[in-house]
């Protein structure tokens, strides 16, 4: 997602339907993967801060696509994604899995 939005500001993102679609799809995949992780290993999944919000965000993107706020998605990319990446990378490293 960071690659899709590299060099963009919020206005550029708002004007780029392809970047929006790509970012939203990746959030859908991440949210579904974390929902599945929570079912398979709840204690491990709980180590991802904000997991319920991430899954809820995924659900909003999937089921409420007509009401997705582009500025909210942009804010999540800029403010929440870096923490999620750091936490996921740390967990993968701890588990001995490459990311």
Image: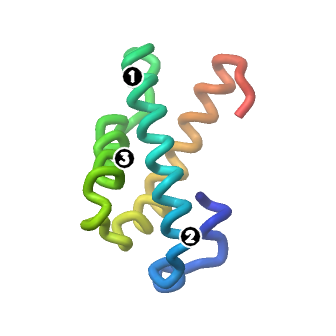
User: Relative to the observer, which residue lies in front, 76 or 39?
Assistant: 39
User: Do the residues bearing badges 1 and 3 touch, measured as CB atoms within 8 Å?
Assistant: no
Q: Indicate which disc, 1 or 3, sits on the residue closer to the N terminus.
A: 1
- Can you tell which mark lies on residue 19? 2
**Vertical side of 98 occupied by 74: above or below:** below
How many marks overall? Answer: 3
Expressed as whole percent of the image width and height from the top left, the position of residue 21 reads 50, 65
Identified at 53% across, 51% down, the residue is: 26
Q: At numbered mark 1, what does the secondary structure look like: helix, strand or loop? A: helix
Nearest the eye: 67 or 69? 67
Pick whichever, 32 or 73, lies toward us.
32
- Counting residues from the N terminus, which is met first, the one under dot 3 or under dot 2? 2
Q: Residue at x 50, y 76 (%)?
A: 17
CB contact under 8 Å: marks 1 and 2: no
Q: Quadrant of residue 56?
A: top left
Asked where in the image residue 98 lies, by quadrant, the reply is top right
Distance between mark 1 and mark 2 Cα atoms: 28 Å
Residue located beneath label 3 in the image: 58
Position of 61 with respect to 81 (left or right) is left
Quarter of the picture containing the N terminus is bottom right
Say few, some or many: other residues with alpha carbon within 10 Å of mark 3 (under 14 / 14 to 19 / 20 or more).
many
Say which element carries label 3: helix
> Mark 1 or mark 2: which comes first in sequence?
2
User: Circle 1 sits on which residue?
Assistant: 38
């Amino acid at each position: 997602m960071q690659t899709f939005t590299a060099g963009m500001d919020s206005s550029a993102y708002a004007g780029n339907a392809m970047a929006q679609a790509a970012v939203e799809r990746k959030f859908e995949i991440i949210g579904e993967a974390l929902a599945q992780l929570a079912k398979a290993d709840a204690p491990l999944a709980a180590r991802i801060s904000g997991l319920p919000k991430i899954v809820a965000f995924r659900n909003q993107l999937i089921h409420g696509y007509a009401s997705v706020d582009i500025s909210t998605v942009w804010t999540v990319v800029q403010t929440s994604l870096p923490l999620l990446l750091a936490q996921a990378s740390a967990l993968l490293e701890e588990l001995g899995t490459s990311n």
